[in-house]
């Protein structure tokens, strides 16, 4: 009986090791179960050489009963963004990361409120950063501010240009949306 128990245990360990090894060799999914977009940085279309990425997939936002109330779609991701006005440079050792998102209201009653401060990026070291208001050079010249918050009726959308001041040279891992104190929704895995 003891020999059968040892043989069975060793067999189970071998099967577990084989399954773990096989799972490790499977490439990461580009369609995560939570609906988040997975993005890889690609060369930017401009001459700056900074990587950029665009992913066009809506991530659902549901209320406590599971009813969709909004969706968030990741647009452009611009590391080392330089489109700011003179005098709005990031602090020494930091750079701007510019991410565009489109939020659509799907609520069936009332308005859906969205605020740029509801978005958070996390870097490879685990640190999180909320966006700061940094107008583009054109917005600064026209003396206009970027949209940072609004309330949307059903079917309406808003595009938010989120600017994060991040540590230079540290990869950004993910973008999250926090529509409430008890919610953290993965919008995109960036790293």
Image (cartoon, helix red, strand yellow):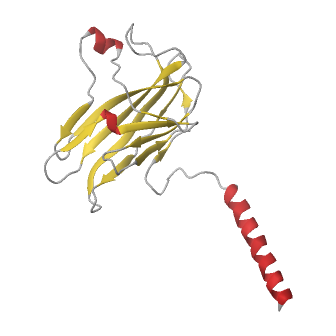
| Residue at image point 26% right, 35% down | 158
Choose between 87 and 18: the one closer to the eye.
87
| Res 18 quadrant in image | bottom right
Q: Position of residue 101 (x, y in %)?
A: 36, 36
68 shown above or below 83 = below
For this orientation, the residue located farthest to the bottom is: 1
| Residue at image point 60% right, 51% down | 28
Taking the image as shown, residue 146 lies to the left or right of residue 1, namely left
| Residue at image point 40% right, 39% down | 74
| Residue at image point 39% right, 8% down | 87
Q: How many marks on residues?
A: 0
90 shown above or below 13 = above
Q: Position of residue 148 (x, y in %)?
A: 27, 29
Quadrant of the rendering where the C terminus is positioned: top right
| Res 86 quadrant in image | top left
Taking the image as shown, residue 40 lies to the left or right of residue 187, namely right
Q: Position of residue 131 (x, y in %)?
A: 38, 29
56 shown above or below 79 = below
Q: Position of residue 167 (x, y in %)?
A: 53, 25
Taking the image as shown, residue 133 lies to the left or right of residue 155, namely right
62 shown above or below 165 = below
Quadrant of the rendering where the N terminus is positioned: bottom right
Choose between 53 and 20: the one closer to the eye.
20
For this orientation, the residue located farthest to the right is: 3
């Amino acid at each position: 009986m003891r020999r059968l128990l040892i043989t069975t245990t060793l067999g189970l360990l071998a099967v577990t090791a084989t399954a773990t090894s096989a799972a490790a060799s499977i490439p990461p999914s580009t369609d995560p179960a939570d609906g988040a977009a997975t993005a890889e940085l690609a060369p930017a279309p401009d001459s700056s050489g900074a990587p950029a990425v665009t992913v066009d997939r809506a991530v659902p936002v549901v209320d406590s009963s599971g009813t969709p109330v909004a969706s968030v779609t990741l647009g452009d991701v611009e590391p080392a963004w330089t489109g700011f006005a003179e005098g709005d440079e990031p602090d020494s050792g930091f750079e701007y990361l510019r991410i565009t998102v489109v939020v659509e209201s799907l609520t069936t009653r009332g308005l859906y409120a969205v605020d740029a401060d509801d978005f958070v990026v996390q870097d490879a070291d685990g640190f999180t950063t909320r966006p700061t208001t940094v107008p583009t050079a054109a917005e600064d010249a026209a003396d206009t501010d970027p949209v940072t918050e609004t309330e949307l009726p059903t079917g309406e959308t808003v595009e938010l240009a989120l600017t994060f001041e991040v540590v230079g040279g540290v990869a950004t891992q993910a973008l999250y949306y926090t529509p409430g104190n008890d919610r953290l929704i993965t919008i995109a895995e960036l790293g």
